[in-house]
Image (cartoon, rainbow, N blue to C red):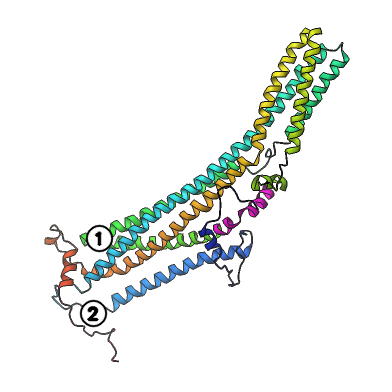
Amino acid sequence: MGAPPGYRPSAWVHLLHQLPRADFQLRPVPSGFAPQEQEYQQALLLVVALAGLGLGLSLIFIAVYLIRFCCCRPPEPPGAKSPPPGGGCVTWSCIAALLVGCAGIGIGFYGNSETSDGVSQLSSALLHANHTLSAIDHLVLETVERLGEAVRTELTTLEEVLVQRPELVAAARGARGQAEAVAQQLQALAFWRGVPLSPLQVAEDVSFVEEYRWLAYVLLLLLELLVCLFTLLGLAKQSKWLVIVMTVMSLLVLVLSWGSMGLEAATAVGLSDFCSSPDTYILNLTQEETGLSSDILNYYFLCNQAVSNPFQQRLTLSQRALANIHSQLQGLEREAVPQFPSAQKPLLSLEETLNVTEGDFHQLVALLHCRGLHKDYGAALRGLCEDALEGLLFLLLFSLLSAGALATALCSLPRAWALFPPRNPSASCSGSHLSEPLLRARLEPEPPPRSFPGCQRRPH
């Protein structure tokens, strides 16, 4: 099948399209895009389920780590003033989590922008295609009405003026018949009139979904940014209530990150299947929704030398009829005006109508050519399958980095909490810095391990 201008499936499309797919019974599923098939739907849901499995494993790992840290920690000796060991590890773990989180936020903003640009390009192509189809309908309607008006007024008047010359009346009636034939041929050229599927409505639906998708991702990015800020403030001021707020927000954003990761992965897989060979699916869907013949759809979606223009015969007949009307009016002007001066006015009006009709006819021929609509089709595919898919992959990377950074932060916060010195009224106004206990913990020698109930080491 003919490829749209400027569109070729990217390497990401080929890579994702070749990934194995399976249904809920782990049976292989073909990678062809078939969203109406139950097995294909199960394959995409299984991709979402993998993200849910990752979320469950992350929560289990965090819970086990926190339980082990809280239950298997040696008690502090009475009067101990030095912070527990491990401050340097806590510092670098928090720094690494913050750096990864900041990198993920930057990648997320870029991916969100790329996805939005791709969807905007898709909407613009649909709107331009709708403008072309509307222009075809408008030109056909305007031309048919103009010819009908000329038949009802000027040609009728001309026949009444030339009633004494039957041969001239016959020539005028011949022009009438040609004009009616042109109007009949042109009415069939408005092929999109009455079709229930409107590109304008599709563009509005796409823009509506994209607006909420963009808003959801911006909120997710802002939430993660707040988590980073709360982490910095909590560690810098050694504020335990800020750490509590940060923990709650981290758990929320962790769940949202894994959830968005599942949706992004399933969407990317499905989009790669569609973009690997979009012509067949779009042809079948458009024919089902519009009821148009396959000749018309193949001409506009493929637009190659192997597919002929389905309107070529009607255009040729209309052009010949317009030429015949023009020659008949010139003959009437030569023979009728000298004998019937009153025939000059309707003849001049008919000539003007014919000139305007011929100009609109040439414009209609250009609009009916497959180049314009096929170019819009290629632009829509490039926006969806290149920019939008690339942005979706960057959003997938953002969700993965966010989940890793949040899990690391959640595991580091309990140790940071243990390093915070106890608050007292005299020190509440003086302020404190995280670096002092952490650096002190790194400089002081680590005490020898002590045995305590519940976490005794077994001899080898």
**Which amino acid type corresponds to the residue marked 1 in the rendered image?**
Gly
Q: Residues within 10 Å of mark 1 (few under 14, many from 20)?
A: many
Q: Which residue, as the protein is rendered here, is positioned at the far left?
A: 426
Q: Which residues are magenta?
A: 271-289
The one nearer the camera, 82 or 16, is 16
Q: Position of residue 402 (x, y in %)?
A: 38, 61
Instruction: State the quadrant of the C terminus.
Output: bottom left
Q: Is residue 230 above or below residue 360?
A: below
Residue at x-position 58% and y-position 72%: 26
* Prevailing SS of the magenta stretch: helix
Task: Tell me: 317 left or right of 407.
Answer: right
The one nearer the camera, 444 or 340, is 340
Q: Quadrant of residue 309?
A: top right
Q: Position of residue 90 (x, y in %)?
A: 25, 69
According to the image, label 2 marks what residue?
74
Residue 353 in view in this figure: yes
According to the image, label 1 marks what residue?
234
Residue at x-position 57% and y-position 55%: 275
Label 1 sits on a secondary structure element that is helix
Label 2 sits on a secondary structure element that is loop
Badge number at residue 56 = none
Q: Quadrant of residue 357?
A: top right
* Residue 5: in magenta span: no
